[in-house]
C-alpha cells in the first residue's frame, strides 16, 4: 500500500568547502554590489547637522528678519516702557548674551534683535525686590509664562544701575557629571575647575570693566600659574589690586577653587556696589539634590558637597549675607524640570511630611529656604490688551500668515489667539503663530 522510497544525500559540497578565516564568521557576504565607498557628508557653515533647536539658535537666521523701529529699554524710566514692545541696546544685548539671559526656546531668531514686552509684572517684581526684607525672591509660574524674560529685565535693570550681575543659567551644567572635579582636602568640598573657569569668565565679560576695577581688594592673594616658560606666582595686593585683576587672572586648575572663593569673598564683603545674583532653572537643584558625580565609594555626590552648590545655598539661607543693602538674590523655576514637594513646603504652601522619600521631598533644601525667608513672586498670564499689543508687533514683523491678516480683523485674531494660547501664555501665543503654518 505504501511504497518505500529512498534518496541519496551528497555531502561533497560541504566536505570540500573552505574553512573560514580566523576571526571571520561563515555566512553570506554583506557587501553591497558596488565596491565604491560611501562619501562622508560634508559639513559647512550652512549645513543643518545639529538638532533643530540648536540650529535655529546659532545659525543666524535672524539676519533675514526685517529691522523694526522700536523704543529702547530704559531701566531708569521703566514706567514709560510698560505696555510696549521694546528692544535692548547694543551694550545691554552684549551683556545679556554673556550672562545667558536669552534661552534657546524663546524664538529670538524670528526677530532682528531680541525684543521683549514690558509688562506690569516687571515693575511689580522690581518693586517686590526693593521692599523685600530678605532680598531673596523666587519667581514661579506655569511653563512659558515668562519667568526667564523677567530675569532678563532684572539683569538689564541691575546693569543700568551700575550693579555687578552674576547669573547661573543652567544649574544642570554643574550637576550633570560632565566636568572635571576633585576633592579639596582643606574645605572638604568638590571643586570643578573647568566649570569655574567658564563661570568666572562670564562674570568678567558681562559686567563693566570700570565698575569691576573700582572695587579694591580687601585681602592679598597669591596663585600659582604654569606656562611654557615655567612656573610663576600671581600676587594680588590688598588696596592696590582690584576685583577686575582677580577675575582676569589665569591660574592653574588646582587653585581655581581658591580663586573662586576669593572672588565671592570680595563680592560679598564690599559695601559700595550692589550685587545682583540670579539663578534660572533653580528647580533643577531642588528636584535633584544628588549630582551625577560619584565619590571614591561610587556614591552620588550631594549638591551641598560641591563648591558651587554650597555657595548658592549659603546665599539662599542668608548664612553669607551681602553688605550692600541693595544687593539681591533672584531665582526662577522652570517648567522643564520635574516637580516635588520641596518648594511648596519651603514656601509654606504644604505641610512637611517626614515620611516622604527624598525623591519627592528634600528636607535640607526646604529648611535652607525657610531660614533665608525666600519670598515668592508668581507670574500671571497676559491680558487681552497685552496679547493685542504683541499681535500688532508680530504683524509688523511679518511672522503672521497673510491670509489670517486678510480674513480677520485684529480684534478677532486677538480673541482667537488668546484662546489658543491658553488664555494669555506668551510662549503658547508665539507657538500658535509660527508653528501652525500649513
Image: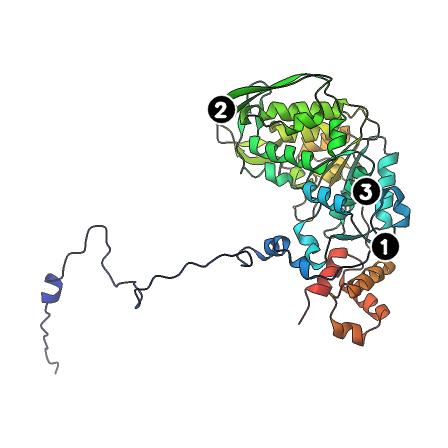
Q: Is residue 10 above or below residue 423?
A: below
- Foreground tag (1 vs 2): 2
> Relative to 9, is 40 on the left or the right?
right
Spatial CA distance of label 1 from label 2 is 57 Å
Mark found first going from the N terminus, 1 or 2: 1
Q: Is residue 201 above or below residue 107?
A: above
> Relative to 120, is 148 on the left or the right?
left
* Residue at the spot of label 1: 84
Considering every residue shown, the one lying at the far bottom of the view is 1
Residue 333 visible in the displayed image: no
Residue 74 rendering spot, x and y as whole percentages: 85, 45
* Residue at the spot of label 3: 377
| SS state under label 2 | loop
Q: Is residue 316 above or below residue 185?
A: below
Mark found first going from the N terminus, 2 or 3: 2
Q: Going 84% across and 62% down the picture, which residue do you hit? A: 388
Spatial CA distance of label 2 from label 3 is 54 Å
Residue 379 rendering spot, x and y as whole percentages: 80, 48
* Residue at the spot of label 2: 229
Q: Residue 356 occupies which quadrant of the picture?
A: top right
Amino acid at each position: 500500500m505504501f511504497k518505500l522510497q529512498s534518496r541519496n544525500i551528497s555531502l561533497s559540497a560541504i566536505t570540500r568547502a573552505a574553512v573560514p578565516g580566523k576571526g571571520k564568521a561563515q555566512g553570506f557576504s554583506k557587501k553591497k554590489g558596488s565596491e565604491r565607498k560611501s562619501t562622508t557628508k560634508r559639513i559647512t557653515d550652512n549645513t543643518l547637522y545639529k538638532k533643530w533647536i540648536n540650529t535655529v539658535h546659532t545659525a543666524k537666521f535672524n539676519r533675514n528678519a526685517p529691522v523694526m523701529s522700536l523704543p529702547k529699554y530704559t531701566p531708569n524710566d521703566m514706567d514709560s516702557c510698560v505696555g510696549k514692545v521694546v528692544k535692548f541696546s547694543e551694550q545691554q544685548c552684549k551683556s545679556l548674551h554673556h550672562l545667558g539671559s536669552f534661552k534657546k526656546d524663546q524664538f529670538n531668531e524670528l526677530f532682528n534683535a531680541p525684543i521683549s514686552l514690558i509688562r506690569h509684572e516687571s515693575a511689580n517684581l522690581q518693586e517686590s525686590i526693593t521692599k523685600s526684607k530678605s532680598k531673596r525672591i523666587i519667581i514661579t509660574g506655569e511653563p512659558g509664562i515668562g519667568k526667564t524674560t523677567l530675569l532678563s529685565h532684572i539683569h538689564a535693570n541691575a546693569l543700568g544701575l551700575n550693579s555687578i550681575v552674576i547669573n547661573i543659567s543652567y544649574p544642570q551644567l554643574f550637576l550633570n557629571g560632565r566636568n572635571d572635579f576633585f576633592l579639596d582636602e582643606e574645605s572638604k568640598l568638590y571643586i570643578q575647575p573647568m566649570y569655574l573657569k567658564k563661570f568666572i569668565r562670564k562674570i568678567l565679560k558681562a559686567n563693566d570693566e570700570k565698575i569691576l576695577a573700582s572695587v579694591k581688594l580687601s585681602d592679598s592673594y597669591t596663585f600659582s600659574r604654569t606656562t611654557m616658560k615655567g612656573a610663576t606666582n600671581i600676587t594680588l595686593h590688598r588696596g592696590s589690586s582690584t576685583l577686575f585683576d582677580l577675575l582676569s587672572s589665569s591660574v592653574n586648575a588646582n587653585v581655581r577653587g581658591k580663586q573662586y572663593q576669593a572672588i565671592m569673598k570680595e563680592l560679598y564683603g564690599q559695601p559700595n556696589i550692589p550685587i545682583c545674583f540670579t539663578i534660572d532653572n533653580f528647580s533643577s537643584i531642588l528636584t535633584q539634590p544628588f549630582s551625577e558625580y560619584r565619590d571614591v565609594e561610587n556614591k552620588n555626590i550631594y549638591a551641598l558637597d560641591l563648591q558651587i552648590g554650597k555657595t548658592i545655598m549659603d546665599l539662599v539661607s542668608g548664612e553669607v549675607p551681602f553688605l550692600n543693602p541693595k544687593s539681591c538674590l533672584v531665582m526662577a523655576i522652570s517648567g522643564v524640570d520635574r516637580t516635588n514637594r520641596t518648594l511648596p513646603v519651603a514656601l509654606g504652601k504644604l505641610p512637611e511630611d517626614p515620611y516622604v522619600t527624598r525623591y519627592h521631598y528634600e528636607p535640607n533644601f526646604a529648611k535652607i529656604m525657610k531660614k533665608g525667608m525666600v519670598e515668592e513672586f508668581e507670574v500671571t498670564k497676559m491680558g487681552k490688551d497685552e496679547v493685542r499689543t504683541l499681535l500688532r508687533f508680530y504683524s509688523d514683523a511679518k511672522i503672521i500668515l497673510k491670509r489670517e491678516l486678510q480674513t480677520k480683523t485684529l480684534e478677532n485674531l486677538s480673541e482667537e489667539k488668546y484662546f489658543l494660547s491658553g488664555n494669555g501664555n506668551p510662549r503658547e501665543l508665539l507657538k500658535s503663530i509660527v508653528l501652525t503654518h500649513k
